[in-house]
Image (cartoon, rainbow, N blue to C red):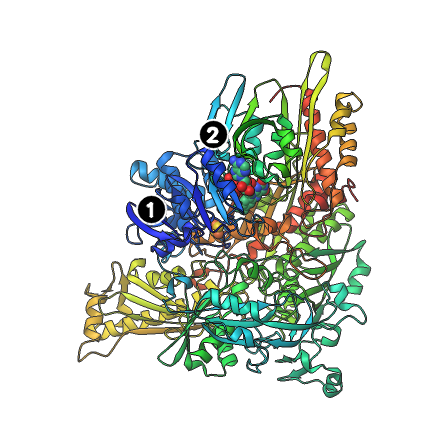
Amino acid sequence: MSTITLTVNNKRHTLEVADNRTLRSVLVQLGYRSVRDSDDGEGFVGSDTVLLNDIPVYANLTLAVQADGATIRTAESLGNSRHLNAVQQAMVDSGVVQSAYNAPAAALLLTWLLEHHPEPTREQVKEVLSGLFIRDSGYEQYYTAVKLASERMKTGAYQSEIAPSFRDNLTYVGKPKGKVDGAVLVAGEPAFVEDRVQPGYYSMVILRSPHAHAYIKKIDISEALKVEGVETIITHENCPDVYYMQAGQSNPEPSPHDRRLLNQKVRHVGDRVAAIVAETEEQAIEARDKIKVEYEVLKPVFTVEEAMADGAPRVHNGIVEFRSGEPEGLAEYNKDADPRDGKVVYMFPLHGDIRRNIASAARGQIGDVEKGFAEADTVIERTYRTTQIQCTPLEPHICYARIEGGRLELHASTQVPYHVRRIVGWVCQIPENKIRVIKERVGGGYGSKQDVLVEDLVGYATWITGKPVFYRNTREEEFIANSTRHPMRVTVKMGAKKDGTITAVEMDVRANTGPYGNHCLTVPMNACSKTLPLLAVDNMKFQVITYYSNIAPTGAYQGYGAPKGSYALMTCMAELAEAVGIDYFQMAMKNKVETGYMLEILRGLGEGREGNVVPVGSCGLEESLVRGAKMIEWGKKVEGPSPEWKVGKGFAMIQQGSGLPGLDHGNAWAKLLTDGTFQIFSGGADIGTGLDTVTAKMISEAFCVPLDRVTVTSGDTDSCTFDTGAFASSGTYFSGGASYKAAEDLRRNLLAEAALQMEEDVDDLSLRAPGEVYSTKTGAVLSYAELSHTALSGTGRGQVMGSGSFTTLHNSIPYGAHFAQVAVNTRTGEVKVQKFYALQDAGTPINPELAMGQLYGAALKSIGHTLYENMILDEEGRCLNPNFTDYGVPMISEVPEDFKAVLIDVNDEVGPYGAKSISEIATNGAAPAIATAIFDAVGIWMRSWPFSPEKILKELGKIQ
Amino acid sequence: MIQEFLVASNISDALALKRNNTKSMWFAGGTEINRYGSTLDAKVGISLKALGLDQIVDEGPSIRIGSMVNLQQLIDSPLVPAWLKEAARYCGSYTRRHMATIGGNLALMSDHSFLVPALLASRCTLMTANLTEGGAYSEDEVPVREYYTYYKQHATTLILAISLPKDKRYVGSRRYALSVQNRSAANVAFGAMMGEGLVISHVRVVAAIHGSGVQRLSEVENAIEAGELSSREDVQLAVSQALEAVDDFVGSSQYKRYIAAEGIGQLFGEFLKGGAR
Ligand SMILES: Cc1cc2nc3c(=O)[nH]c(=O)nc-3n(C[C@H](O)[C@H](O)[C@H](O)COP(=O)(O)OP(=O)(O)OC[C@H]3O[C@@H](n4cnc5c(N)ncnc54)[C@H](O)[C@@H]3O)c2cc1C
Ligand code: FES
């Protein structure tokens, strides 16, 4: 122990610390909670950045004793949510504060930079941010934030444009107005699950499987239970016999219920073996070390090819059941089942065959592909492969649960609070009214928090023990026991006539779902459903088969299967163009869909049921292509900086959806408060993307009141109404659509009440700033405050409220095109993305600055997937790179030299104020755009991502 | 993770603390010692922060860089040659560069080292301090190649400073990794002098290869000095044959051999074109 003195934010602290305590843990203990950690002290992410004697350091990589006598600044010194400093405010205004787990660290670094260099260069900004990993918004808008802050510090006002504006007739929608939760987030104030944990909580740790495939023969917890402080240990022997699915999807789920909380069979390295709850984490770890497990190790399968081989080991060999649509001969099929494997319960048939490791399958077609291929002058068939990718949210999966008033209360970092409630209810076997889920701010989700990966266990442990339980994944657990991108093998066969008309397309998708079938139908289906409808081709056919294996789990990841499908389909189209001898851009222009084209292909692309055939609605595809081609100077050859650097250009057409028509559902309700301000309750889960701001804008726009007159309560299952959750690009469209309808309903009710109070006809009344009802006939005015006061007086008619529910069968598809210019080094295999232009139509971008951030963030993420991100397993199924340094994620140094996001202005006919979705689609372009650019540069086709230098060198014939 | 942190008040004190504490380790920036997943194992950290080793001094014929100088200081100092600044930039994080020291980096001698290949290629000298067996204080000037060759024997040696001769010598390095902050597959360096009549001398060829450690390719050095390898292609071939490399998650052995040879070939080509750095 040592006595140290720290002066933190001008306050002196003298305290006794153990020599091995990190500076971060001491700062957090002293109340400086903005100093966060994203990697358990790896020293990579920088969420723990502080200034030590005016020098930036990682507090988690520094011992507290090292800092004895030092002056320390944390983000708390900058300002608070009500008084932000210029940098914090500029960060909020420019749209970089999104999931924001390390936004306080960024604000601290940039404030420091501006203190030393009031007008920093781009290089200086890049340098200072180089030690910070930012996953949500890419890095590009940070340059804008610094510029704005610098201008304001110098002149008192911004001189530059924050972001483009849309819709001149609207005041809030389509305008950069900041993010309603931005101030709290950038100031580092309590917002995340970890900030809600009360003293006296119990810790949970998990014993995980060292084997990829094994039966637990024996598990002995007797010694572990003797460890002081241990409250309970949950194993497959004492957990509820409830089969469920962790994928937070629509109910009934298009994923098999193929797991219990803990299973007798472990199916991947890192699978749950036991959960230990104890008074302290140290006690829980000590107990974990004392659990004795005997395994019967089985041969694992890791690839689609291994899984489909005759006689392959069966990942699931239990009893198969169906909740509906049971096929004939099931009893016979189940004869072979091994009870140790448990069950696989299908809610409805997904064409799985677990004895052949098939979790689900689907197929469909339009026209006659054989005829189409016969009509073609050239037919090619190519196979593309993608690897397993990690979402890497900066805030790992985390949950804190406690019993409150006899009910189970979960503080969760989730995209799907209502599915958490349902699934935890199933597991605990308690009704939903006994559970409250409070979605806190989410420090990054990207799909992985659509899956209920920790709440099930924490909720159950709390329910049975009655104790408050806290659990947080380590970064390694984030890699090995989490949702990741499904690795896929996609074969595309395509035929075209000499003039470039595509006559037929056939797509064969083989997906690897790993140990459990999370999203095993929907993710691979998206490889087809979010790509094939880009093409106006009469003959199309697809087949999707998903296999179980023993790799680390997979699940939802931004874009679902679309990035993989897009990579295969677009690259194959470029290969076909080359084979036909026509320019790839011309081929795209010739075969793309346009408004009004009837999307027959959608019929076969529903998620487990027949899809709706609709025509293409609002569509910015052509404009994206034409403008993008102009920006990148398509067709103009560019010389590299030296002979070994070859430059090439590529692009891809992209699309996604705006939620799932006929499946997704949003609800909201709103009320007028007594002083004329508003509160709106949305079921939607804002995961950092700005959904709460969309919600607030629905009220602001309808009632002509500024955003600070509107309070948004969202993601709390007690006070808000049901919403399917933040996935499948549904936020703005479905949840925002519900808020729009609630605002309209409230508006109608408010006008009706005003008409009665003012004794006027409703048709003569309108609403206007700063918050009043105005009679166009008499000129009479009634403020919302007066109106509400009267309505709520003893003789009033009661609170003015409104509600809205949004469902649709319409498909508001966002479209776009991503263009890349790359330089490839023919001697080293390096690929540099010199230019990346992401052009997308999001309908009306309700929060343009946040939409741009989503776009930059998703595009950069997909550049990472394309070039280097990759989970590598050894022959036993152990992940060899479960940390940031070895896995590799794009940092500011990897941002393309010229990176532009362009919002193409189209107005959708169904979405709220004409909005469609923005972010998922932006993950679909990089792989095919870069692959086609590489071909243009050096004449090789990259048919497997990531395009590492080693693979490039192999294709170039430099190594074998 | 260390359990006890001792701050040495002067160099003799540091050496005494080291000798008197089993399982102790010099503690510089701590970026490797404190890091999650570090392979370093010590119970006691002996902090060097109070020893005044954080200066860069122009000593006329050479530049003396204190072992506690951090990588950002190297970049910011006008005294430091370009080749060393470039190697310091291989540490892609500005924040980490402020914490990581040159002494710590050198002492780690890691297979993905930022600085070791370049420092070895530079023929720098290390100022070291140690206690003799009898406990007497001794300072030494150790050529970096000797420190490398007898690395294990230097386990208790305290590096005080690195002395860079100002002679007209070419030094260059190249680092190959998937991204700036990924672990490198290879970091290679080449150093040499071009004398009268284009005689090449004092050649150093070094490669830090992931999974196979830091390698000094003496045979290649000798062959270049002897004029047996005179073209970039010759050097590349010789390097790829001389290098040890294994397959691992960072890359195949073939890739590592290829890329290291390519890098050294490039550096050799640059050297031939002339110019000291
Ligand atoms: C995320 C991350 C990635 C990293 N990647 C790399 C990488 O790619 N390449 C790389 O080279 N390093 C890497 N490092 C390690 C490290 O940051 C650097 O090597 C750094 O230069 C070590 O210096 P330090 O002062 O922090 O060393 P410390 O951690 O303090 O010490 C490291 C070792 O050096 C010894 N030592 C320190 N000073 C002296 C001295 N004066 N005399 C003798 N021995 C001494 C210590 O006893 C200890 O054994 C990485 C670190 C992190 C956190
Ligand atoms: S050590 Fe910096 S975020 Fe973990």
Q: Which chain carries label 1?
A: A
Residue occupied by mark 1: A6
Could you say where residue B153 lies in the image, as x and y percent from the top left?
Answer: 63, 37
* Amino acid found under the numbered disc labelled 1: Leu
Q: What element carries label 1?
A: strand
Q: What element carries label 2?
A: helix
Asked whether residue A205 is in view, the answer is yes
Q: How many marks?
A: 2
Q: Is residue B30 left or right of residue A76?
A: right
Asked whether residue A178 is in view, the answer is no
Residue at the location (72% across, 86% down)?
A330
Q: Distance between the residues labelled 1 and 2?
A: 28 Å
Rendering quarter of residue A685 = bottom left
Could you say where residue A56 lies in the image, as x and y percent from the top left?
Answer: 42, 41
Residue at the location (43% across, 54% down)?
A36
Q: Mark 2 lies on which chain?
A: B
Residue occupied by mark 2: B76
* Amino acid found under the numbered disc labelled 2: Asp
- Tell whether label 2 touches label 1 (CB within 8 Å): no
Q: In the rendered view, would you say A885 is above or below A525?
A: above
Is the CB–ligand 1 distance for label 2 below 8 Å?
Answer: no
Within 10 Å of disc 1 (Cα), the crowding (few <14, some 14-19, many 20+) is many
Question: Closer to the camera, A908 or A487?
Answer: A487
